Image: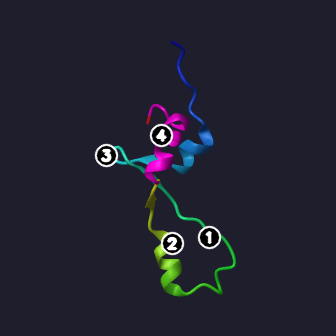
């Protein structure tokens, strides 16, 4: 079997935790921030987990991580 190539764009965006879950960053944090409340912007800083439904698809993108 040949090796599977890692999708580099996904490798930069997603990290795998010690327990095997996939971590991602939240969206809506790049511009138009003046209209968003402090609390919302603060919560957008925290990483989130990829949903169970999408996890299998993400594993195909980053096979060796």
Marks 1 and 4, how far apart at CA: 25 Å
Labels 1 and 4 touching (C-beta < 8 A) = no
Q: In the figure, 5 relative to 41: above or below? A: above
Packing grade of label 4 (10 A; few <14, some 14-19, many >=20) is few
Q: Secondary structure at mark 2?
A: helix
Marks 1 and 2, how far apart in space? 8 Å
Residue position for label 3: 18
Q: Residue at x 47, y 45 (%)?
A: 55
The mark that comes first in sequence, 3 or 4, is: 3
Label 1–label 2 contact, CB within 8 A: yes
Q: Earlier in the sequence, mark 3 or mark 2?
A: 3
Residue at mark 3 to residue at mark 2: CA–CA distance? 22 Å
Name the element at disc 1.
loop
Residue 64 at x, y = what percent? 45, 31
Residue 19 x, y percent position in the rendering? 30, 46
Range covered by the magenta-colored residues: 51-64
Instruction: Say whether disc 1 or disc 4 marks the residue closer to the N-terminus.
Output: 1
Q: Mark 2 = which residue?
A: 44
Mark 1 surroundings within 10 Å by alpha-carbon count, few (fewer than 14), some (14 through 19), many (20 or more): few
The image position of residue 47, as x and y in percent, is 45, 62
Q: Tag 3's secondary structure? A: loop
In the picture of the structure, the residue carrying the numbered disc 1 is 28
Q: Going from the N terminus, do you reach mark 2 or mark 4 first?
A: 2
């Amino acid at each position: 079997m040949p090796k599977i190539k890692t999708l580099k764009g996904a490798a930069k965006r997603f990290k795998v935790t010690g327990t095997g879950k996939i971590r991602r960053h939240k969206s809506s944090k790049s511009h138009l921030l003046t209209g968003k409340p402090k609390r919302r912007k603060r919560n957008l800083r925290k990483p989130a987990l990829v949903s169970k439904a999408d996890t299998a698809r993400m594993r195909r993108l980053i096979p060796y991580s």
